[in-house]
Image (cartoon, rainbow, N blue to C red):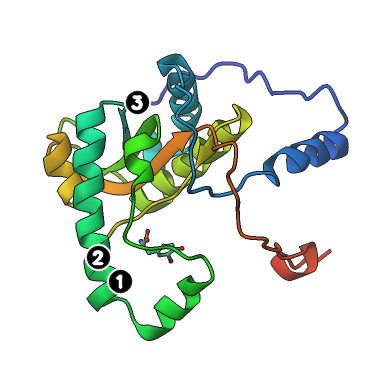
Amino acid sequence: MSIPQKPFSPYTPELESVDAARAFYEIVKQRRTVRQFSQTPVPREVIEQVLLAAGTAPSGAHKQPWRFIAVSNQDIKHKIRLAAEEVEREFYEQRASDRWLKDLEVFETSPDKSYMDTVPWLIIVMALRSTDDGGQVYYLNESVGIATGMLLTAAHHAGLATLTHTPSPMNFLRDVLGRPEHERPYMVIPMGYPAADCTVPDLDRKGIDEISVFLE
Ligand code: IYR
């Protein structure tokens, strides 16, 4: 049995493709990972739209193997902060290799995750190891990775700043959030407006010749 087909309504940009592509690049190249957030509230409806955008991602056999836990509750954010700081302390003090610490040095990251208390929202991305009714899922990491990328892009497009945080191990999140076994914590994404005095590392991005090979 197959899914009924319907006519496809393609998205047609108002600009020529090259101009549309350029305009989008001009927007997304302004996206930066930030670690200083404003306490200006972000309405739930904004978050819902961003999550709906993420949920349009393609997925293996259209299983949509993701769940986004959106936390603005102060107590829960604080619990997540404390637990994340604990695993991060262990990372910085014991688990990280010297080379890893050296690579991180320039970013001045640390186990201090105090922004988790002040940021309006923490979005915890869960990868579903099975569907909610126990069914098989496919290409889980690829599917959730794409959805997460779209989430970051949608947040940026709405003027919100994000941080991709992967405390490791991340299983504490399932307990703190009271989530079922088949939800595997994938990423923690603090989300809000950037602080007025927010700074970011002065980084370069690779150019087209470095990130691509054209065989024409
Ligand atoms: N998870 C740690 C360490 C860390 C690792 C990488 I790779 C980064 O790009 C940034 C941080 C932390 O969040 O501090």
Mark 2–mark 1 CB contact (< 8 Å): yes
Q: Position of residue 42 (x, y in %)?
A: 46, 22
Q: Position of residue 61 (x, y in %)?
A: 38, 39
Residue 1 shows which numbered tag? 3
Q: Is residue 15 left or right of residue 25?
A: right
Residue 197 rendering spot, x and y as whole percentages: 59, 42
Q: Amino acid at mark 1?
A: Tyr
Disc 2: which residue: 89
Mark 3 or mark 2, earlier in chain? 3
Residues tagged 3 and 2 counted as in contact (Cβ below 8 A): no
Residue under pointer 1: 92
Q: Is residue 181 visible?
A: no
Residue 175: which quarter of the image?
top left
Q: Foreground residue, 63 or 6?
A: 63
Asked whether, in this view, residue 145 is left or right of residue 213, the answer is left
Taking the image in four quarters, ligand 1 sits in the one at: bottom left
Q: Which quarter of the picture shows residue 87?
A: bottom left
Q: Nearer the viewer, mark 3 or mark 2?
A: 2
Q: Quadrant of residue 18?
A: top right
